[in-house]
Image (spheres, grey):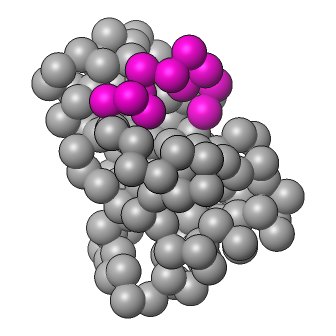
């Protein structure tokens, strides 16, 4: 699975995802300072799972019609505990992603939101 890790992810999270065998492109390494709009406009975005702590991606996709990634994993967990974020992300990936959805991780659980224009997004 190809993951696009937003620049705002803690290095520990990126290391844990890579150690688990996932192909992770970290924006901090490949395009520091890249705008969210530029990330969503990539030619390969539909093949990537975007991992972020930034809710602006939801606005760009749901309200402004930007291209969609394969899925978005958006963490609203406490940034001061990157280990816990990595644990939750890895557990979610292991269970299976809801493609064509934005999955929001919260302290209470997970919320799924189907991307606009998608009839059946679960795979």
- Where does the image place residue 76, in percent across and percent down from the top left? 30, 67
Decide if residue 49 is in sight here: yes
Is 102 situated left or right of 63 in this image?
A: right
Magenta segment: 37-48
Residue placed furthest toward the bottom: 80
Residue situated in front as seen by the camera: 66 or 100: 66
Q: Is residue 39 magenta?
A: yes
Q: Residue at x 23, y 30 (%)?
A: 60
Image quadrant where one finds the N terminus: top right
As drawn, 67 above or below 8: above
Q: Residue at x 64, y 67 (%)?
A: 14
Q: Residue at x 40, y 11 (%)?
A: 119
Q: Residue at x 44, y 88 (%)?
A: 81
Decide if residue 6 is in sight here: no
- Where does the image place residue 99, in percent across and percent down from the top left? 54, 32
Image quadrant where one finds the C terminus: top right
As drawn, 31 above or below 79: above
Is 87 situated left or right of 102 in this image?
A: right
- Where does the image place residue 96, in percent across and percent down from the top left? 66, 47
As drawn, 8 above or below 36: below
Is 97 situated left or right of 52 in this image?
A: right
């Amino acid at each position: 699975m190809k993951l696009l890790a937003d620049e705002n992810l803690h290095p520990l999270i990126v290391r844990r995802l890579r150690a688990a065998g996932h192909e992770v492109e970290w924006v901090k390494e490949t395009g520091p300072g890249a705008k969210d709009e530029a990330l969503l406009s990539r030619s390969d975005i539909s093949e990537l799972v975007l991992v972020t702590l930034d809710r602006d991606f939801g606005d760009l996709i749901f309200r402004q019609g930007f291209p969609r990634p394969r899925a978005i994993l958006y963490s609203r967990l406490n940034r001061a505990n990157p280990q816990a974020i990595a644990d939750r992300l890895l557990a979610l990936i292991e269970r299976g992603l809801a493609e064509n959805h934005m999955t929001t991780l919260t302290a209470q659980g997970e919320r799924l939101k189907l991307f606009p224009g998608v009839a059946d997004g679960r795979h």
